[in-house]
Image: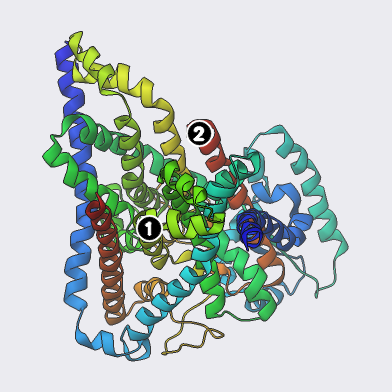
Amino acid sequence: MRLFINKVVLILSTLAAILGLVFLFWILITFTIKGLSSINLYIFTHDLVDNGLRNLLIGQFVLAFIAVLIGVPIGMIAGIYLQEYSFGSKYADIIRNLSDVMMSAPSIVIGTFVYAIIVNPIGHMSGWAGAIALGIMMIPIVVRTTDDMLGLVPKELREAGVAIGAPKYKVIFDIILKAAKVGIMTGLLLAFARIVGETAPLLFTSGNSEFFTLDLNKEFPSLTVAIYNLATMPDKHLVDIAWAGAFILTFFVLIINLLGRYIVKEKK
Amino acid sequence: METLFKRLSAFSATIILLILTSIFVVLFIYAKPAIKEYGIKFLVDPRWGVVVENQVSSTQIQSSMDTSINSDTSINDDEDIPMDVDIPTDSDIPTDSDLVGQDNDIPTDNDFLAQTNTPTKAKVIYGGLIPIVGTILSTLIAMFFAVPIAMGIAIFLSEIAPPFVAKPVGIAIELLAAIPSIIYGMWGLFYFGPFVAKIFGGSSVSLLVAGLVLGIMIIPFMASLTRDSMNTTPNVLKESAYAMGATKFEVIKDVIFPYAKKGIIGSMILALGRALGETMAVAFVIGGVFNLPKKLTDPTVSIPVVLANNFAESSGMSLSALFYLALILFVISFIVISFAKFYFLRDKK
């Protein structure tokens, strides 16, 4: 009887695993087939107004890149504080936990927040607002990564630095950050992969634009927002463009993730 | 230089605190008109964008109001007018505090109707019941669907599968957790929705489809976290149980689960928090109509979806009501996530 129950449970959980995997691969295969069939050179060289994706791809990348410029310095320095300057104080603990909570806060709420503080006072949506929303999303991820990676640096390295009389900031920049470089880079890469696919915070901050623009004061083209708009259109051709965009996005995010893994493996 | 950097770093850390509190404060400020107007009964009011007025030329006013509010309202009116009639639906929810609010509510409505007999004055009511119910139900469906499958995957990966299977499958699961949620939504709209509609009947956009897509989306996340916490069980414990003649199931049930219980529950709550606040995966498949679902296959709406669809074209009271919803969502998910963090996933630092 025990053996029978054992068998039943093992079979059930294997089946559950297979069922889950079937769904997940179903998604991937659909996207590959649909995406590949609607991808061509045309969409890379034309803007959305001419049924292409060029302005969207560039726009999304610009938004994410500015978000990195906002989120990474703040997040990294905050992470350094938590690990190097706080000396395990209560305050640092609170910040650490809050940052974790913020990491899982609903992304659309961050969108509404940025709408309230930037879009509403200015009166229209802008690329800056979208980039700031993504930047805010990125900060806690970077804090977490930096905090974790610096925690792995052996204490002896720090002591060696201090022993030769280097000031603490020099120890941090020249020794500790160098030692943790690979880990932090990987973390940043994954953080980038995460925000590049975000839609919800952009819906009413950056909006979307059909034209090619690099002017961050106006509504800014965004791939994910465009996918959302296009996929619900009745026009089949527009839906096909959305499939192509979605495929490129998925592909890009997976490549970054694989790259991150590869770097970690190289290190070991 | 040294002190400068130290100050800077402390300041950056404080920024996190600042952002989090200012999110709360800003949402509260913007939601204040709605909070003042509707109070706590916002939570149980199923009417959204319903024009309450009592004049002879009602159709005229209504149509002029509709154009001034937003495009969605005009659609919702068809759904909501019957609900407007049976206001007592609220009293289906028999929590005592609600009933108290209810008693106050109906007379004030009547007072209002009695007082304002001028045809120019009309009032738009916004209530959050439908999106709140939609959010909670879709999350519950997602959890019911995702928990067994994610547990199955975690058990399979950590205990059953040989390493040469477990490793690539594990990596695949982690990669799937990284896929943007809009992808899941789009797949749900074009493939999964019709598939579910074929089996259960009803429309291809519905509460059920939304819940299932959400569930599929959180499976990889939940499975990889659960597997990680199951893998923390020391091998010595497992081996000694096997040495006693325990079967694999008994080891899982009596050794691994008790050991990794907190981590497993914590990861489930984290996944729950993620499902609560998810926008894009749901926006495609929930339907986006203000309609209190009577069966699972009815289309409805959830808080993030209301925000996503109506935010850009709202102003005045409707915008404030949306901020009220955002505040509710933020508070709920804040509580859920902090609960998971502080109670179950406490770091052993």
> Which of the pair B157/A191 is nearer the observer?
A191
What's under tag 1, amino acid-wise? Lys
Chain bearing tag 2 is B
List the residue tagged with mark 2. Answer: B346
Q: Within 10 angstroms of label 1, few (less than 14), some, or many (20 or more) residues?
A: some
Relative image position of residue B241 (x, y in whole percent)? 24, 13
**Is residue B86 found left or right of B156 in the rendered image?**
right
Q: Are labels 2 and 1 on one chain?
A: no
Say whether residue A203 is visible.
no
Identify the residue at image location x=33%, y=85%: A54
Identify the residue at image location x=61%, y=81%: A124
Identify the residue at image location x=76%, y=59%: B32
Q: Residue furthest right?
A: B115
* Disc 2, SS: loop
Identify the residue at image location x=50%, y=55%: A171
* Disc 1, SS: helix
On residue A181, the disc is 1
Q: Residue furthest top?
A: B244
Question: In the rendered picture of this protein, how many numbered marks are placed on residues?
Answer: 2
Q: Within 10 angstroms of label 2, few (less than 14), some, or many (20 or more) residues?
A: few
Q: Are marks 2 and 1 in contact (CB under 8 Å)?
A: no
Relative image position of residue B179 (x, y in whole percent)? 32, 58
Q: Nearer the viewer, mark 2 or mark 1?
A: 1
The image quarter in which residue A8 lies: top left
- Which image quadrant: the N terminus of chain A? top left
Relative image position of residue B14 (x, y in whole percent)? 65, 55
> Which of the pair B79/B160 is nearer the observer?
B160
- Between the residue at mark 2 and the residue at mark 1, the CA separation in whole angstroms equals 27 Å
Relative image position of residue A175 (x, y in whole percent)? 43, 55
What's under tag 2, amino acid-wise? Arg
